[in-house]
Image (cartoon, rainbow, N blue to C red):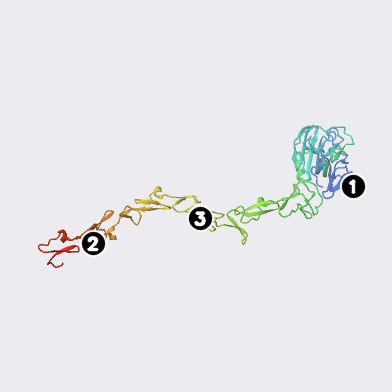
Amino acid sequence: LDFLFQNNIVAAYSATSYSGGSIWKPVIGLENVTVPADVSFDATERAFHTPGGGNLMEIPIRTSPVALDKVTFEMWIKPVSCFGEDSRCWVITQSPDFGWPRSITLSDSRLGFTSITVGQRWDSGLGRSAFNRWTHLVGVWDHEGTANVYRDGVKGNAFSPAGNGVGTDNAKQTLLLGGYSNNEAAHTSNILISEVVIYNTSLTDEQVAQLYAKGRISCTECRSGTYKHLRGSQSCSICPSTASSSSGSTTCTCPDGFGFIEDENECGDLKECELGTHTCPGGSPKNSTCYDTEGSFECDCNPGWMWAADSNECVDIDECKHEIARCDCNAVCRNSEGSFECACGDGWTGTGMPGGCADIDECIQGVPCASLGCNNTLGSFLCVCPTGYQADNAQSSCVQVNECELNPCDDVANCTDTEGSFLCQCEAGFAGSGVPGSCFDINECDSGQHDCQHVPCLNTLGSFRCAGECNA
């Protein structure tokens, strides 16, 4: 088995080397661990189970400052529970107690819960350890120097000077695994222990980090239903009840829609929407939205899109064609992907939404008619000329209208075009205004407007003749 820093190891124990019975032999070192009947061996976890409250495992090794001025305890454990509500959960302890013996704890509130003893109350800053997961614990003491504690590679507060555990260096000194003393409930722990290593030096932060990165030692291939950690442990752990694994697996297979969370040893929702592993059509969030559900996900078409069963996708709704869009009566509807636009028509301005289009008064916004007059109309305008004039072909100026070409006068009247108007004048022999139907024959005989001498005057249409004269 491959242990780091072997030149500084006093004794090293791995549960993978246990062959049964009341003796747990070291991988490195000479002293055996005594395994009492109260301690069982979990073959699946490849670890010893100390339930607490009974006899503890013992290692006949002296670790007081008299024997080891500098010492490091390293353990791989899996806390199951503390033995009793008030248990302080000590996991390895120097015995006998010479006054705050060198120990590692999991739940001693006097020391910061996960901590080491330093000779007085203090706070390690690490807090409680989690149950039912493999945990790497390291306690480091340098007598009259600094003491440090680490959990899963994370260093707690440091304490100095560390002067605890001093006593007569007698041959009866031991290390107890799983508590403070035999048959004592206040400090014992319900834990699994797979590895214990004692070093005759105070390991550095970097060395402790290497130990944690190396993980637990295992000489077995994990069977089906268990898995081997890729980080933090090399032993086998049982998959959660909802998961499975094949022989030699390094992870557990969860039901569809769930993924294995190694740190928590459980199957958790995959959150396909958050991870982008969903299959919502069209590429969310363009035309559909993904909603995570427990173990799965749901897709909804976004507003402006609808489900097309024949193509199995969200397609654009043409709001203009289906008369879903509401635009102003003076606006036009233009469809767009997932929406629509209302645009006011020519001669109108505004949002295009209902009531949102206002007439543009082109006459006051510019000179659309050049020198012509301008009359605004709803949505447009008219270019106008004064009476008697009309716009030229270029709509740029007014030209005079020859009204006489339209025969506006009486049949026996003459039309004279004038600036911007016209005159009608009845022909000679007729009187009247000249407008249609107004000219009438003048009776020159009655009015004395003839030149007949001594003969009668005879009236004719538009003239007269004297009796005895022939008609011209």
Local packing at callout 3 (Cα closer than 10 Å; few below 14, some 14-19, many 20+) is many
Local packing at callout 2 (Cα closer than 10 Å; few below 14, some 14-19, many 20+) is many
Q: Position of residue 162 (x, y in %)?
A: 79, 33
Instruction: Note whether 408 is above or below 150 in the view shown.
Output: below
**Pair 2/3: label in front:** 2
> Which badge, 1 or 2, is on the more N-terminal residue?
1
- The numbered dot on residue 410 is none
Q: Position of residue 322 (x, y in %)?
A: 54, 58
* Nearer to us in this view, 110 or 120: 110
* Nearer to us in this view, 223 or 29: 223
Secondary structure under the numbered disc 3 in the rendered image:
strand
Local packing at callout 1 (Cα closer than 10 Å; few below 14, some 14-19, many 20+) is few
Q: Quadrant of the C terminus?
A: bottom left
Q: Is residue 29 visible?
A: yes
* Nearer to us in this view, 294 or 472: 472
Q: Position of residue 125 (x, y in %)?
A: 74, 37
Secondary structure under the numbered disc 1 in the rendered image:
loop
Quarter of the image for residue 224 reads bottom right
Apparent side of residue 83 relative to residue 326 in the rendered image (left or right): right
Residue with the mark numbered 2? 412
**Pair 3/1: label in front:** 3
Q: CA distance from mark 3 to mark 1?
A: 88 Å
**Pair 1/2: label in front:** 2
Apparent side of residue 249 relative to residue 400 in the rendered image (left or right): right
Residue with the mark numbered 1? 21
> Which badge, 2 or 3, is on the more N-terminal residue?
3
Q: Position of residue 285 (x, y in %)?
A: 61, 52
- The numbered dot on residue 333 is 3
Q: CA distance from mark 2 to mark 3?
A: 61 Å
Secondary structure under the numbered disc 2 in the rendered image:
loop
Q: Looking at the picture, which amino acid does disc 2 mark?
A: Val
Instruction: Note whether 212 is above or below 337 in the view shown.
Output: above
